[in-house]
Amino acid sequence: MVTSITSTAVDILLVEDNPTDAELTLRALGKHNLANNVEWVKDGAAALDFLFRRGDYAARGNAVPHVVMLDLRLPKVDGLEVLQQIRANEHTRLIPVVVMTSSKEERDIVDSYRLGANSFVSKPVGFEEFAKTVVELGLYWMLVNQVAPATE
């Protein structure tokens, strides 16, 4: 159930290298009709390529996601570096970024907020709790939160 819609607007950019966690996230969002416009990338380099329209994503439209769900422990480019680059660019700095990681380390929490994360969520271990957390995040960021207008 991986959704990839690089030719249209993306509501959620899911940056997750663990296929099980990604599938659970997509399934939970889909169950509540929040997965219509999700792009799943499996590493930090792909996330940056997507956001900055490079490489495989060079031809995609210039719309930015409503929210980025970002894991920290990623191959190629780690999540904190992705977050730092998002915040350093005038076209992406206002995108809400939810760090969703298995880490509960204080340093990761502090570094995430210092670099501009909008939220830090430790992934629950159990399936039901994980699904509930994802749905609550999706509902909040997609239906309750107001996004900043595009700067392009």
Image (cartoon, rainbow, N blue to C red):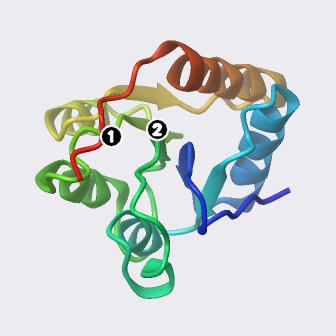
**Image position of 123 (left or right of 112):** right
Crowding at mark 1 (Cα within 10 Å: few <14, some 14-19, many 20+): many
Image quadrant in which you'd find residue 94: top left
Looking at the rendered structure, the kind of residue marked 2 is: His
**Residue nearest the observer in this picture, 67 or 9:** 9
Judge whether 113 appears above or below 14 on screen: above
Q: Quadrant of the N terminus?
A: bottom right
Q: SS at mark 2? A: loop
Quadrant housing residue 53: bottom left
Question: Camera-side residue: 70 or 30?
Answer: 30
Residue type pointed to by label 1: Ile
Residue 95, disc: 1
Tag on residue 66? 2
- Pinpoint residue 105: horizontal percent, then vertical percent: 35, 34
Is residue 37 toward the left or the right of residue 121 in the image? right
Left or right: 3 in relation to 120: right
Q: Residue at x 12, y 54 (%)?
A: 88
Q: In this rendered view, identify the residue nearer to me: 149 or 130.
A: 149
- Residue at x 38%, y 27% (from the top left corner): 147
